[in-house]
């Protein structure tokens, strides 16, 4: 599957912004019976989401259904190596999702609880935030 990135953004380059506080949206299970909830605030890159998704899919093989509740829409820029100071803002390098504490990252359905726990544990190992397994 292709790496997660928006087809179109209103502004090509964004400012960094500041992430703090706890999440108010996307904090309850909406689709599946089991989920992975973030306990920290950090940027999660499209690559990390994809690595976690692949870990879950590989563990589940064919069974179960997976929902990804976050989407990386924030562009992060980077200037080339050995570029001197000045010369403006760098080109867009990758996309991230600024996650806050309390946000559901993945949801699973159609499998046993032990399987879901193991699959989400493997996904959590790929993510830069502390997480918690939750069930309905």
Image (cartoon, rainbow, N blue to C red):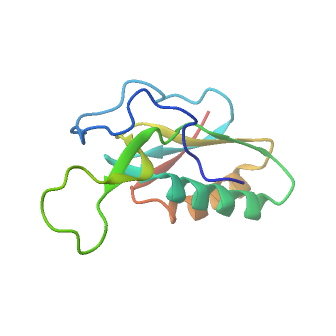
Relative horizontal placement of residue 25, taking residue 31 as reference (left or right): left
Viewer-side residue, 105 vs 39: 105
Give the residue drawn at x 74%, y 57%.
57
User: Total marks drawn?
Assistant: 0
Residue 69 figure quarter: top right
Question: Is residue 105 shown above or below 59?
Answer: above
Can you give x and y, in whole percent of width and height, for residue 12 in the image?
A: 39, 37
Can you give x and y, in whole percent of width and height, for residue 24 in the image?
A: 37, 24
Relative horizontal placement of residue 30, taking residue 113 as reference (left or right): left
Image quadrant for the C terminus?
top right
Residue 20 figure quarter: top left
Relative horizontal placement of residue 94, taking residue 123 as reference (left or right): left
Can you give x and y, in whole percent of width and height, for residue 28 in the image?
A: 52, 28
Give the residue drawn at x 16%, y 68%.
84
- Residue occupying the far left of the picture: 85
Give the residue drawn at x 33%, y 40%.
13
Viewer-side residue, 34 vs 13: 13
Image quadrant for the N terminus?
bottom right
Can you give x and y, in whole percent of width and height, for residue 104 in the image?
A: 50, 38
Viewer-side residue, 30 vs 85: 85
Give the residue drawn at x 23%, y 37%.
17
Residue 114 figure quarter: bottom right
Viewer-side residue, 86 vs 45: 86
């Amino acid at each position: 599957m292709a790496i997660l990135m928006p087809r179109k953004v209103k502004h090509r380059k964004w400012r960094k912004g500041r992430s703090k506080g706890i999440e108010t949206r996307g904090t309850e299970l909406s689709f599946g019976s089991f989920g992975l909830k973030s306990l920290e605030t950090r940027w999660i890159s499209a690559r990390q989401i994809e690595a976690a998704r692949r870990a879950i899919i590989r563990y589940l093989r064919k069974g179960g259904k997976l929902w990804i509740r976050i989407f990386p829409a924030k562009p992060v820029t980077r200037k080339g190596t050995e570029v001197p100071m000045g010369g403006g803002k760098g080109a867009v390098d990758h996309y991230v999702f600024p996650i806050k504490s309390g946000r559901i990252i993945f949801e699973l359905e159609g499998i046993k609880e032990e399987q879901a726990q193991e699959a989400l544990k493997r996904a959590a190992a790929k993510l830069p935030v502390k997480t918690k397994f939750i069930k309905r």
